[in-house]
Amino acid sequence: MKRRAPLKRGKSLVRVGFSTTPKPLRANTELKRGGKLRPRSVKTERVYREQRRPLVAALLAEPTICPVPDCTNVADSPHEPLTRARGGSITDPSNVVAICWFHNEQISAEEPPWAYDLGLLRHSWDKDGAA
């Protein structure tokens, strides 16, 4: 393996290819910095607005207690046992459970084993059957 020399400040990168004379690399457009990233795409935002909000509103319409044992908090946060990264849908009513905010944050951050036991988290291979 050929060892490469480290880049030096101020030295421009060069394009190496079929040409015998190296050409400096240049951007085709001006680089824009400081622009904010959208948290969701336009399509996802439309789905969220049209389908997810009414689903969550219906789920949280009647106050219930968090389904985690020994928790007496009001279930005020929608939670998806089968996450979108694992193939779940945010608009599927069978994939949304109301739990308290504290446990929703805890399950999302840590993925504790008890969440799988209670059916509050599911693996991607558990798509069809409920836990």
Image: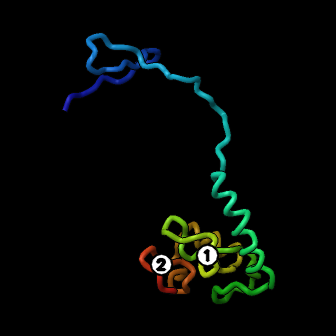
Give the farthest residue toward the right. Answer: 62
At horizontal 26% and vertical 19% (from top left) the residue drawn is 18
- Amino acid type at image mark 2: Lys
Element under disc 2: loop
Give the farthest residue toward the bottom. Answer: 69
Quadrant in the picture for the N terminus: top left
Identify the image quadrant of residue 43.
Answer: bottom right
Image coordinates for residue 71, horizontal then vertical, percent: 69, 85
Please give left or right for residue 93 compared with residue 3 in the image: right
Closest to the observer: 67 or 21? 21
Mark with earlier residue (1, 2): 1
Within 10 angstroms of label 2, few (less than 14), some, or many (20 or more) residues? some
At horizontal 45% and vertical 18% (from top left) the residue drawn is 9
- Say if 110 sits above or below 63 in the image: above
The residue at which mark 1 appears reads as 92
Closest to the observer: 87 or 34? 87
The residue at which mark 2 appears reads as 127
Identify the image quadrant of residue 32.
Answer: top right
Image coordinates for residue 109, horizontal then vertical, percent: 57, 66
Q: Which mark is residue 76?
A: none
Element under disc 1: loop
- Amino acid type at image mark 1: Asp
Count of marks placed on residues: 2
- Say if 65 sits above or below 11 in the image: below
Q: Which color scheme is applied?
A: rainbow
Image coordinates for residue 114, horizontal then vertical, percent: 53, 82
Please give left or right for residue 74 compared with residue 33 in the image: right
Please give left or right for residue 80 compared with residue 15 in the image: right
Within 10 angstroms of label 1, few (less than 14), some, or many (20 or more) residues? few
Give the farthest residue toward the left. Answer: 1
Image coordinates for residue 106, horizontal then vertical, percent: 61, 71
At horizontal 64% and vertical 71% (from top left) the residue drawn is 91
